[in-house]
């Protein structure tokens, strides 16, 4: 649906053509502001985790939910049948977005 329904997810081509294809870029395309990834390379082995690391980890997961809700809202407003329970999505296994692996959500 993301690839074939640009009115639902108009960022597909922009993401493929972008130099940065990570989550931060996807968040920027969807919501107008990139995800702060400054904690990504911090020392996650050291305990206790810093408050900034905890915030980073929560936001990193939360934006995925936000993107899913955005897609769901758009499909609903366009009256496109959609059910997360039977959706088989795709994840990309490399930065070039070439190899796709099917997953059940």
Image (tube, rainbow, N blue to C red):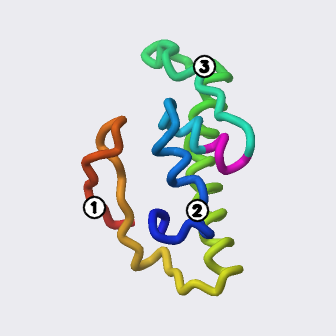
Mark sitting earlier along the chain (1/3): 3
Query: At x 58% / y 37%, what residue is drawn?
Result: 25
Q: Which circle, 2 or 3, is nearer the viewer?
A: 2
Q: Is residue 38 magenta?
A: no
| Other residues around mark 3 within 10 Å, as few (<14) / some (14–19) / many (≥20) | few
Mark sitting earlier along the chain (2/3): 2
Query: Which one is nearer the viewer's eye here, 80 or 36?
Result: 80
> In the visual, does 101 lie left or right of 12?
left
Q: Which residue is mark 3?
A: 38
Q: Which mark is residue 9?
A: 2
- Residue 51: x and y in percent read 67, 23
Task: Specify the quadrant of the image occupied by residue 78.
Answer: bottom right
Query: Which one is nearer the viewer's eye here, 77 or 86?
Result: 77
> In the visual, does 85 lie left or right of 38?
left
Q: Is residue 30 magenta?
A: yes
Q: Which residue is mark 1?
A: 102
Q: Which circle, 2 or 1, is nearer the viewer?
A: 2
Query: At x 62% / y 47%, what residue is drawn?
Result: 63
Mark sitting earlier along the chain (2/1): 2
- Residue 49: x and y in percent read 56, 20
Query: At x 66% / y 50%, what residue is drawn?
Result: 30
Q: Are marks 2 and 3 in contact (CB under 8 Å)?
A: no
Residues rendered magenta in the picture: 27-31
**Mark 2 and mark 3: Cα distance apart in space:** 27 Å
- The local secondary structure at tag 2 comes to loop
Q: Which mark is residue 30?
A: none
Q: Residue furthest right?
A: 32
| Other residues around mark 1 within 10 Å, as few (<14) / some (14–19) / many (≥20) | few
- Residue 27: x and y in percent read 63, 43
Where does the C terminus fall, quadrant-wise?
bottom left
């Amino acid at each position: 649906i993301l690839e074939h329904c640009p009115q639902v997810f108009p960022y597909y081509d922009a993401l493929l053509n972008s130099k940065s294809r990570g989550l931060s870029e996807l968040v920027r395309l969807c919501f107008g502001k990139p995800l702060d990834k400054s904690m990504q390379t911090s020392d996650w082995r050291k305990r206790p985790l810093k408050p900034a690391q905890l915030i980073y980890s929560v936001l990193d997961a939360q934006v995925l939910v936000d993107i899913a809700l955005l897609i769901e809202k758009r499909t609903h407003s366009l009256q496109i049948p959609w059910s997360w329970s039977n959706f088989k999505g795709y994840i990309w296994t490399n930065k070039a977005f070439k190899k796709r692996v099917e997953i059940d959500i």
